[in-house]
Image (cartoon, grey):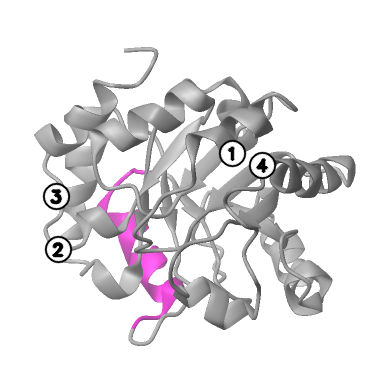
């Protein structure tokens, strides 16, 4: 089964986001095992900006260390590799930077075709936070105001009408405030496609509020970086999934 087909059937759950700059390979096997044992099925890998690590070499090594499927969440066209199970082909619908609307896609598409990588067309929606995050700086994109769910709806609809298969709502890595549940509810009213929500989610209670609002995947990234989550850490999130 393709990753997308599995996602379309998936129950609400946490989704681990790995920044290769912050996940040493020597720590990865134990961290991945803890996530899998708690119920994790996929991990995202990528970053708005990688300063020290080759994403391709990291993924190549990681695949030998753990069976955990890796889904590429690229911050740029430099963050691609055939050593992943699929790629989120991100359409930055909330921005107006042509490179993140079509330019980078044209440059990287021949490589993905050559590799036979599963491509998941994904509408990427940046929502407002109280500070500029790395993703805003790198993409030169203004976020959608967080108190305008109708604007988030309109932007998501544009992506869906263009054939996108997943919605990704992001406040940015390390955001102090995650996307509001009301935004996720507004999106779930529109569509049954998988909704991924990330940015500023540090505790199970916040994750639970987003699942209750209609999120499929709640992304946990920054919270795992100071100290990799143990199995019990992950289980506190999985325990609050609506299907649990």
- State which region is magenta: 53-68
Determine which of the numbered discs, if any, sits on residue 30 in the image.
3
Label 4 close to label 1 by CB (< 8 Å) = yes
Q: Which residue is mark 1?
A: 183
Earlier in the chain: of badge 4 and badge 3, it is: 3
Label 4 close to label 3 by CB (< 8 Å) = no
Which-is-in-front pick, marks 3 and 2?
Answer: 2
User: Label 1 to label 2, Cα distance in Å?
Assistant: 29 Å
Q: Horizontal and vertical percent for residue 176?
A: 34, 59
Which-is-in-front pick, marks 1 and 2?
Answer: 1
Quadrant for residue 89, please give it.
bottom right
Which-is-in-front pick, marks 3 and 1?
Answer: 1
Dot 2 alpha-carbon crowd within 10 angstroms: few under 14, some 14 to 19, many 20 or more: few
Helix, strand or loop at label 3? It is helix
Q: Is residue 196 left or right of residue 8?
A: left
Q: 128 and 244: which one is in front?
A: 128
Q: Horizontal and vertical percent for residue 206?
A: 32, 36
Earlier in the chain: of badge 1 and badge 2, it is: 1
Helix, strand or loop at label 1? It is helix
Q: Which residue is mark 2?
A: 226
Q: Is residue 221 left or right of residue 140?
A: left
Q: 76 and 29: which one is in front?
A: 76
Please say if 199 is above or below 54. above
Please say if 64 is above or below 211. below
Helix, strand or loop at label 4? It is helix
Which-is-in-front pick, marks 4 and 2?
Answer: 4
Q: Is residue 196 left or right of residue 25?
A: right
């Amino acid at each position: 089964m393709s990753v997308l087909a599995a996602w379309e059937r998936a129950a609400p759950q946490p989704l681990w986001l790995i920044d290769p700059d912050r996940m040493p390979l020597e720590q990865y096997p134990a961290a991945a095992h803890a996530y899998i044992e708690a119920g994790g099925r996929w991990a995202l890998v990528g970053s708005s900006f990688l300063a020290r690590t080759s994403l391709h070499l990291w993924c190549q090594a990681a695949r030998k260390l753990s069976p955990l499927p890796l889904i590429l969440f690229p911050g740029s066209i430099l963050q691609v590799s055939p050593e992943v199970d699929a790629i989120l082909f991100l359409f930055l619908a909330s921005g107006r930077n042509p490179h993140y609307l079509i330019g980078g896609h044209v440059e990287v598409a021949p490589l993905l075709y050559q590799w036979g990588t599963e491509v998941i067309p994904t509408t990427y929606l940046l929502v407002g936070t109280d500070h500029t995050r790395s993703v805003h700086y790198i993409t030169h994109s203004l976020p959608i105001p967080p108190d305008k769910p109708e604007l988030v709806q309109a932007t998501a609809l544009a992506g869906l009408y263009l054939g996108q298969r997943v919605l990704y709502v992001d406040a940015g890595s390390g955001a102090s405030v995650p996307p509001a549940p009301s935004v996720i509810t507004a999106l779930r009213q529109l569509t049954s496609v998988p909704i991924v929500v990330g940015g500023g989610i540090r505790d199970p209670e916040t994750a639970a509020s987003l699942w209750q609002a209609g999120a499929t995947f709640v992304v946990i990234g920054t919270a795992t970086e100071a100290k990799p989550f143990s199995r019990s850490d992950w289980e506190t999130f999985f325990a609050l999934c609506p299907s649990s």
